[in-house]
Amino acid sequence: MLKGIDPIINPELLKILAEMGHGDEIILADAHFPGHTFCPKRVVRGDGLQIPDLLAGIISLFELDSYDDSLIMMAAVEGDTLDPQVETDYMAAIRKSAPDAPDVIHIGRFEFYDRAEEAYACVMTGTTAKYGNILLRKGVTPLASSYK
């Protein structure tokens, strides 16, 4: 056990978050997402874990990109609708550690799949919310003024 790290972050995920560099992306995928198909690089199993809980743990360790879109979710397919509570719950978890986090942007399903194929990693969760996937883009961790 390490101090200051949410226990929801298992050692494999902690290693991945530490390895990621500026601009790398990670998908937190709902239980329906074809992660093993669209995330060929690294898949972490987080069965039973819920995305808001993971977001709260990850964002306390992870700087979001301030240059490019850093929070991306899938837009509803034509004729379908999004449940706004999903995004509300995600943003509440994110803003616990990052109160100035940007709003989520939505991209089409196939564009999201394309991004997943290039993502550094994908965490398969137990979240069953429709359109529950979220992509996080890592930013530069600011250095404390005492570091040179």
Image (spheres, rainbow, N blue to C red):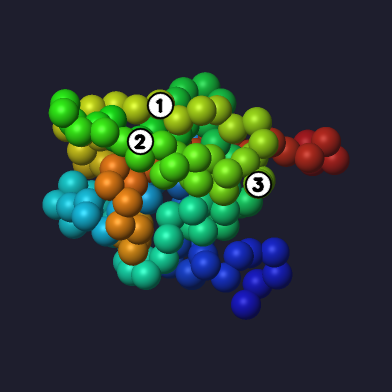
Q: Position of residue 45 (x, y in %)?
A: 32, 66
Q: Quadrant of residue 117?
A: top left
- Residue at mark 3: 96
Is 39 placed above or below 8 here? above
Is 100 placed above or below 93 here? above
Q: Name the residue furthest right.
A: 146
Q: Amino acid at mark 3?
A: Lys
Instruction: Point out the image quarter for the N terminus.
Output: bottom right
Instruction: Point out the image quarter for the C terminus.
Output: top right
Q: Name the residue furthest top.
A: 67
The CA distance from mark 2 to mark 1 is 6 Å
Residues marked 3 and 2 touching at CB (< 8 Å): no
Q: Secondary structure at mark 1?
A: strand
Q: Amino acid at mark 2?
A: Met
Q: Secondary structure at mark 3?
A: helix
- Residue at mark 2: 73
Q: Position of residue 12 (x, y in %)?
A: 43, 67
Q: Position of residue 126 (x, y in %)?
A: 33, 63
- Residue at mark 1: 105
Counting other residues with Cα less than 10 Å from the Cα at mark 2, is it few (<14), some (14-19), or many (20 or more)?
Answer: many
Q: Position of residue 2 (x, y in %)?
A: 65, 72
Name the residue at 16% across, 26% down. Answer: 78
Q: Name the residue furthest bottom.
A: 1
